[in-house]
Image: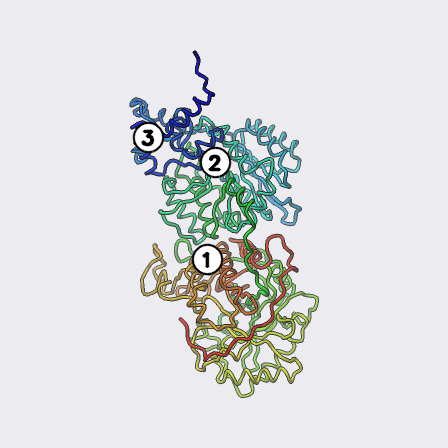
């Protein structure tokens, strides 16, 4: 009599079997739990046909049923391949995964089929050029075709996607076969971009070729798929379909994409089971990954690993920009010799998780995204009511700089000459979109203002260099006044420190002294009038023109001078002026009471760096973990410690109550001070964006008028720069836009300023470390 396998009794017996393990199976279960080599999320996602009841006991199901069926306990372990490459285990008649768990993983045994090396024809290299102003879809899908016979499967799925996307296809070149396939793809998808590529760098180098060319710039999100045939897997076709279908479902894709892009904690979206965590996945890739991350000033440790596995995922524009910033070219990638680990391509797969972590984000799987879509939307973080950025009106020759630093000197000279002083030190930083501009060309100011507006910056706070009636670096703004057609919202900050040869305003030979002669206040006010009467001069509260003083503690009589300046503006017909000062955290000769100014501006890194934050040159010695240029006499401190301190409650409590919160994209004055530079190590657009999120959550609601101040727009010689660069492109501006305007919003839709707050009186300013 044949047993009915689908009878209620048979089904119940199968369910009970996983609860009552044999002695050997219990030992297997205990050993597997101790190593975390079994991936339950992967297992449940990879084999959806498993009865839902067994999802409560996935490891038990694998031990009793799964291994016999050839199921994989994790993406990189094939039971049949393990026995094939390890005949001693096969001879023992032992469970392959049990053997691997109790000892095989320590012996670096082969766990999956080794790929074959194919000899393929050479391909003619094409120079990729994309028009940055071209019309784009919202999304891009990049498909790499190594196995041509898988293309029909991809074509069917892509043809049915319910979203607006541009298609990019890279083909591992196989001669006439690839030529024919290229023609077929072009016929099916006439607007697709098709690129034949050499067999190098797996699917990663072809993707990086598109990234580096700028072809993927400007999309809201990019999907990356490839013909993951996985010859080392018995279920290769099913597995590929799971990975691709997990991120490109034929139903509900737009809703999931909206959820993914609205989630501030997600940088990559993968199919279920494809978020790998745990140091067992390092393989031979740690050192290469560490080297790659230092290209972005990101430090990693061996003890943490989290990444989107399988190289099939959606990713955000920030992640694409960081990949581009690594500046990896074909010559960096290994030639294909059937490597299964330890290549740059393998390491780059692991860097993805660290890129996400640098932004304070992570990897989300499809099931998790579905749950997020069902959940109520999180409360949005507050946005700045008004955003300013310090602006340096240098970058044009003047007689004084010719005399002091050499004919034709501008800050560009030091910027291009800056040298990298240790592994991972991102110098020099070079401008891209705006080039090495001359600010005597007023159109340049208009181009800067356009970029700033698109990023949500409401005004430039322009340094005003005035020394008892003597002006320097005045040409850019004076020329602007004669060009009312140039949109350039601004207000002035009197940079009242003396100019000194060592650039810090505190010590060294005096080049141009600030003397504060009797009556200087009236003359300074008179000099400011043409600017304040210009229609582009900003009144952030809607009424009062704004004016700032860089170092109020340097004035002989701060309270008296401020009062005289206010009265002079009234007499000149300007009326009340919103007067502010930089919170410099350094004692001057004369104490300054908080309440003589309407507001203070926090200006990182000033006041945010203490002894324990130094990585090199501080009291704790070299904590950088590697050698620095032998003659270096400067300081290197941790940018991430600056972020942490800026939201520290004790630090915030030490500031005047009417302080505008500040942030800096970076800080590194190697271009000015060379081997005596002060360097904030660890800065990049992802960390800057993370800082802005922390500010929005912890500082912005109590910031003066809910304003934000950025140091700076174009301090190139201090690497405090928001302008586009050859390394990061416009990523800093993109990250700022996320916090000021939001994705997809128009620049004109910035929130209205809040009414000014009146701060209680405080005692005179004290120095703050």
The residue indicated by pointer 1 is: 683
Judge the density around disc 1: few (<14), some (14-19), many (≥20) Cα neighbours within 10 Å. many
Numbered disc total: 3
The residue furthest bottom is: 518
Mark closer to the chain start, 2 or 1? 2
Compared with residue 85, is residue 108 higher up or lower down, i.e. above or below? below
**Residue 88: x %, y % from top left:** 29, 24
Along the line of sight, the residue nearer the viewer: 152 or 436: 152
The residue indicated by pointer 2 is: 202
Question: Tag 3's secondary structure?
Answer: helix
**Residue 272: x %, y % from top left:** 49, 38
Question: Tag 1's secondary structure?
Answer: loop
Residue 81 can be seen, yes or no: no
- In screen coordinates, is 627 left or right of 2? left
The Cα–Cα distance between marks 2 and 3, rounded to whole angstroms, is 31 Å
The Cα–Cα distance between marks 2 and 1, rounded to whole angstroms, is 31 Å
Mark closer to the chain start, 1 or 3? 3
**Residue 492: x %, y % from top left:** 58, 73
**Residue 420: x %, y % from top left:** 42, 57
Residue drawn 54% across the image and 52% down it: 378
The Cα–Cα distance between marks 1 and 3, rounded to whole angstroms, is 45 Å
Along the line of sight, the residue nearer the viewer: 420 or 285: 285
Mark closer to the chain start, 2 or 3? 3
Q: Which mark is residue 232?
A: none
The residue furthest top is: 1
Dividing the picture into quarters, in which one does residue 525 lie? Answer: bottom right
The residue indicated by pointer 3 is: 98
């Amino acid at each position: 009599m044949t047993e009915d396998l689908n009878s209620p009794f048979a089904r119940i017996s199968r369910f009970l079997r996983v609860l009552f393990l044999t002695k050997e199976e219990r030992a297997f279960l205990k050993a597997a739990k101790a190593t975390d080599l079994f991936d339950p999320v992967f297992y449940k996602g990879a084999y959806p046909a498993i009865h839902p009841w067994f999802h409560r006991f996935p490891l038990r199901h694998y031990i009793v049923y799964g291994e016999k069926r050839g199921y994989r306990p994790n993406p990189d372990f094939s039971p049949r391949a393990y026995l094939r490459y390890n005949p001693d285990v096969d001879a023992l008649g032992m469970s392959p995964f049990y053997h691997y768990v109790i000892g095989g993983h320590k012996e670096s045994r082969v766990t999956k089929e080794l790929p074959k090396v194919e000899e393929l024809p050479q391909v003619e290299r094409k120079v990729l050029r994309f028009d940055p102003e071209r019309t784009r879809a919202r999304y891009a899908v990049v498909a790499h075709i190594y196995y041509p016979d898988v293309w029909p499967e991809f074509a069917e799925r892509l043809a049915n996607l319910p979203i607006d996307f541009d298609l990019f296809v890279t083909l591992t070149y196989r001669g006439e076969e690839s030529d024919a396939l290229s023609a077929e793809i072009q016929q099916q998808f006439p607007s697709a971009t098709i690129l034949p590529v050499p067999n190098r760098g797996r699917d990663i180098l072809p993707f990086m070729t598109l990234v580096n060319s700028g072809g993927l710039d400007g999309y809201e999100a990019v999907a990356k798929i490839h013909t993951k045939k996985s010859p080392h897997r018995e279920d290769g076709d099913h597995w590929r379909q799971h990975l691709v279908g997990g991120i490109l479902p034929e139903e509900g894709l737009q809703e999931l994409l909206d959820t993914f892009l609205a989630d501030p904690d997600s940088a990559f979206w993968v199919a279920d089971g494809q978020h790998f965590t745990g140091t067992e996945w390092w393989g031979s890739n740690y050192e290469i990954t560490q080297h790659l991350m230092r290209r972005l000033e990101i430090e990693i440790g061996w003890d943490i690993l989290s990444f989107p596995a399988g190289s099939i995922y959606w990713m955000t524009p920030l992640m694409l920009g960081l990949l581009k910033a690594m500046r990896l070219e074909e010559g960096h990638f290994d030639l294909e010799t059937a490597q299964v680990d330890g290549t740059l391509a393998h390491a780059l797969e692991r860097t993805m998780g660290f890129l996400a972590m640098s932004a304070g984000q992570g990897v989300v799987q499809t099931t998790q995204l579905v749950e997020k879509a069902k959940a109520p939307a999180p409360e949005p973080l507050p946005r700045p009511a008004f955003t300013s950025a310090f602006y340096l009106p240098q970058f044009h020759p003047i007689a004084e700089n010719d005399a002091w630093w050499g004919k034709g000197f501008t800050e560009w000279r030091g910027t291009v000459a800056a040298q990298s002083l240790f592994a991972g030190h991102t110098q020099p930083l070079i401008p891209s979109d705006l080039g090495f501009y001359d600010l005597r060309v007023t159109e340049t100011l208009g181009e800067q203002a356009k970029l700033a507006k698109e990023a949500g910056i409401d005004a430039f706070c322009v340094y005003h260099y005035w020394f008892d009636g003597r002006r320097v670096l005045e040409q850019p703004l004076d020329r602007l006044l004669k060009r009312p057609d140039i949109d350039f919202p601004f207000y002035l900050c009197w940079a009242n420190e003396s100019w000194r040869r060592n650039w810090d305003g505190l010590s060294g030979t005096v080049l141009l002294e600030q003397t504060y002669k009797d009556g200087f206040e009236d003359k300074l006010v008179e000099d400011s009038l043409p600017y304040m009467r210009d229609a582009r001069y900003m009144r952030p509260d809607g009424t009062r023109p704004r004016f700032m003083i860089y170092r109020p503690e340097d004035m002989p009589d701060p309270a008296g001078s401020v009062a005289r300046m206010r009265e002079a503006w009234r007499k000149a017909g300007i009326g009340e002026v919103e007067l502010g000062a930089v919170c410099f955290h350094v004692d001057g000769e004369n104490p300054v009471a908080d309440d003589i100014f309407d507001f203070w501006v926090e200006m990182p890194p000033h006041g945010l760096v203490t002894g324990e934050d130094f990585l090199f040159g501080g009291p704790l010695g070299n904590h950088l973990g590697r050698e620095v240029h032998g003659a270096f006499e400067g300081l290197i401190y941790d940018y991430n410690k600056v972020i942490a301190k800026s939201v520290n409650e004790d630090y915030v409590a030490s500031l005047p109550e009417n302080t505008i919160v500040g942030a800096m994209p970076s800080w590194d004055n190697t271009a000015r001070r060379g081997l005596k530079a002060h360097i904030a190590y660890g800065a990049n657009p992802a960390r800057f964006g993370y800082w802005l999120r922390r500010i929005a959550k912890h500082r912005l609601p109590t910031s003066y008028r809910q304003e934000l101040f950025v140091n700076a727009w174009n301090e190139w010689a201090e690497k405090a720069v928001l302008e586009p660069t050859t390394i990061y492109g416009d990523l800093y501006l993109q990250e700022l836009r996320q916090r000021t305007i939001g994705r997809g919003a128009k620049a004109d839709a910035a929130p209205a300023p809040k009414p000014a707050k009146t701060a209680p009186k405080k005692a005179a300013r004290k120095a703050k470390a």
